[in-house]
Image (cartoon, rainbow, N blue to C red):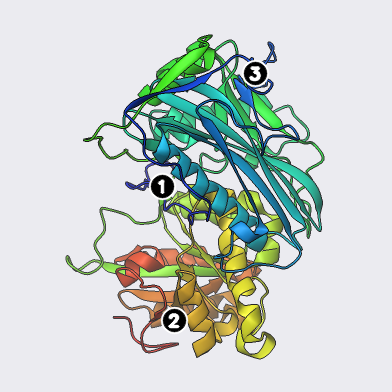
Amino acid sequence: MSSTRAHQNKAVPEPGRRVALPWLPGVTAMVLLMPLAGCGVGGSASGDPDAMAVLVDGTGEDSGSTDHEGVTVRTGDADSFDDHPYIPGGVDISVAYPEFEGAEPFSEGLAERVDTEVADFRAGTRDPVALTVDWQITAAAPDVLGVRLVRTEEDMHGLREGYSTHWYDAASGHTAYSTELLADQEALETVNGLVRDQLADDGDVDTATLHPVLRTYDSMGFNDAGELVVEFDDGHLSPVVEGHVPSSEPGRKTAVLDAEEVDPLLSDLGQRAREASLSDEEQVTVAAAGPEAGEPGPVPGVVSAQDPDVDCYEDGTRCIALTFDDGPHEHTPELLDLLSEEDVTASFFLNGNPALSRPGTIRHIYAEGHEVASHNDLHENMPEEFDEEELPAQVAAVSSMVRRQTGHSVELFRPPFGAGSEAVLEEIGEQGMAEILWNVDSDDWQDVPTEQIVANVVSGAAPNTIVLLHDPLETTMEAVPQIIEELRALDYEFVSVSQALGGAEAGESYPPGGLGAPAP
């Protein structure tokens, strides 16, 4: 789907939960940050073009215990993160990250992001064993700081490393994602194309999994030559392994983009971050945020499924929401291509095992401007198969998997078979989601022929209805083009579930009358 269809969000992504670690007290407007010489490993990347410049390295054995002047190292273990929706027992957590005098908003922003990483590792991996988070300082100047976090994860699938680099704009007090080094979404799409070209001949990389979304480009910085280094987690770009998570064996993958080629794509923050990465100053001061700092602009890589040009309630527009359950599946990319060609927005309700084995397809769905939602971890009747104490894990899993791949926080949840209960709805609400059922059942899951699927959808259509479909089914794939054609002939606009409903409140069930109820 073209970038004109993928409507960029106008707000900064919802931050993660705040970690339960202490904060530094307030300080004066200008303070000494640190002398760069002699702090940790120090120095830069020693001419390695694939490595970001590193001013202070906190990834050694003493990273959690050694403080530098102006820098306090905060640490935490499993007990420090006691407010997550799902907390599996026996998982070893060890985190360390820096806090900076004079940059308290950055300290708080890093804490929120570390907290989200811990929560999503706990819920979004299979049988988690251990998570360690270490840190490096990649840039330091009066107006910008850069911190690279290194995650070492272990679960039933083995060990892998992951990376994210976070940036602080002292002028505004804003903790920025790596994509904010770039000017806008168009610049990110250009970078995505350059990276695809550079990695095209790497047999360990499936370039079809590269999409211009927040979590794919969550670790970017600059090397000693001022080139943009883009790095990817172990396995993030690996080809699909049917029924298994993509292999992490190829390890860290990088693309290094020419400084002159990238220069016009950088934001003001990006320009300043590059200068700070190249600085050989031994002492740096950091300025406190101005009292009238403006709100940050749209974050490249954050995509909205809301079409701002469509109003389903005020101007008589006939809206309808096509929803697809049980994916992602090997058919899903084909379906996405069709929806792109037809300029159709849809909503996808994903299950846990397919989501783990096809993470690139999740990113594809999100990048195309579709709504990504949860269909529970395991595709089981929730009231019948799970005790109440098992519900938090079931509800949290797909949300965490999606956020780890895209940065998007899921807001919609559909229980398998539409089978809910008061306990299920309560857990969905506590995790910030609304329950979504449907008005129109295509009956595709009942092994009816393609023609019947089309007839069921078209005959049941009404403004703002939610249609149940399943993208793993071949008959559904055959039916979708005709469904689009016939509904379009009836003047329907295809929108996400959230847009068809005019918004959905966490803890509520839609449609209000239950399965098959008329649209609002």
**Tag shown at residue 6:** 1
**Tag shown at residue 335:** none
Secondary structure at numbered mark 3: loop
**Relative side of 488 to 176, left or right:** left
Secondary structure at numbered mark 2: strand
Q: Position of residue 235 (x, y in %)?
A: 73, 43
Query: Residue at label 3?
Result: 42
Rendered position, 450 above or below 261: below
Instruction: Pick the quarter of the image with the C terminus.
Output: bottom left
Earlier-in-chain disc, 2 versus 3:
3
Which three-letter amino acid code belongs to the residue tagged 3?
Gly
Residue at left 82%, top 40%? 249
Callout 2: 10 Å neighbours few (<14), some, many (20+)? many
Query: What's the distance in space between the residues labelled 2 and 1, CA to CA?
Result: 26 Å
Query: Residue at label 2?
Result: 440
Which three-letter amino acid code belongs to the residue tagged 1?
Ala
Q: Nearer the viewer, residue 91 or 182?
A: 91
Earlier-in-chain disc, 1 versus 3:
1
Which three-letter amino acid code belongs to the residue tagged 2?
Val
Callout 1: 10 Å neighbours few (<14), some, many (20+)? many
Query: What's the distance in space between the residues labelled 1 and 3, CA to CA?
Result: 42 Å
